[in-house]
Amino acid sequence: MKSKKSAEDVWRFQKRKWKRKILFNSHYCRNVKKKKSRINRKLKETFYRNPGYFLAGVRVLGQSEG
């Protein structure tokens, strides 16, 4: 009986760890999304203030690829 109980405890611990991992992942994704939206907002601000700067950046990227 003791060994069976310990096995159950191990499984319960693994389940808890798995749940924690999922929670951590979702939290991480949320943070990444926040960061991305923040970066996009900055890009939009620079684009609206100075469209030439944005176009020059795009041109440079295109040249490096070609």
Image: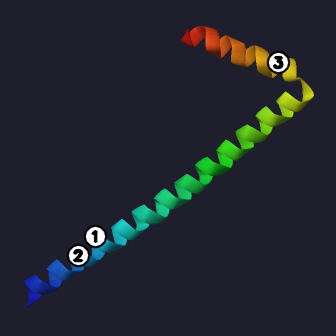
Q: Is residue 39 left or right of residue 10?
A: right
Q: Earlier in the sequence, mark 3 or mark 1?
A: 1
Location of residue 22 in the rendering, given as x and y in whole percent from the top left corner: 43, 63
Q: Secondary structure at mark 2?
A: helix
Nearest the viewer among 44 and 30 is 44
Residue picked out by circle 2 = 11
Q: Secondary structure at mark 1?
A: helix
Give the number of the disc on residue 32.
none
Quarter of the view holding residue 30: bottom right
Disc 1 packing (10 Å; few <14; some 14–19; many ≥20): few
Q: Residue at x 85, y 35 (%)?
A: 45
Residue picked out by circle 1 = 14
Discs 3/1, front: 3
Which amino acid type is shown beneath numbered disc 1? Gln
Location of residue 63 in the rendering, given as x and y in whole percent from the top left corner: 62, 8
- Vertically, is 63 above or below 29? above
Disc 2 packing (10 Å; few <14; some 14–19; many ≥20): few
Q: Is residue 14 left or right of residue 66?
A: left
Residue picked out by circle 3 = 53
* Residues at marks 2 and 1, CA–CA distance in whole angstroms: 5 Å
Q: Residue at x 91, y 28 (%)?
A: 49
Considering every residue shown, the one lying at the far right of the view is: 49
Location of residue 35 in the rendering, given as x and y in whole percent from the top left corner: 66, 45
Q: Residue at x 77, y 33 (%)?
A: 43
* Residues at marks 3 and 2, CA–CA distance in whole angstroms: 57 Å
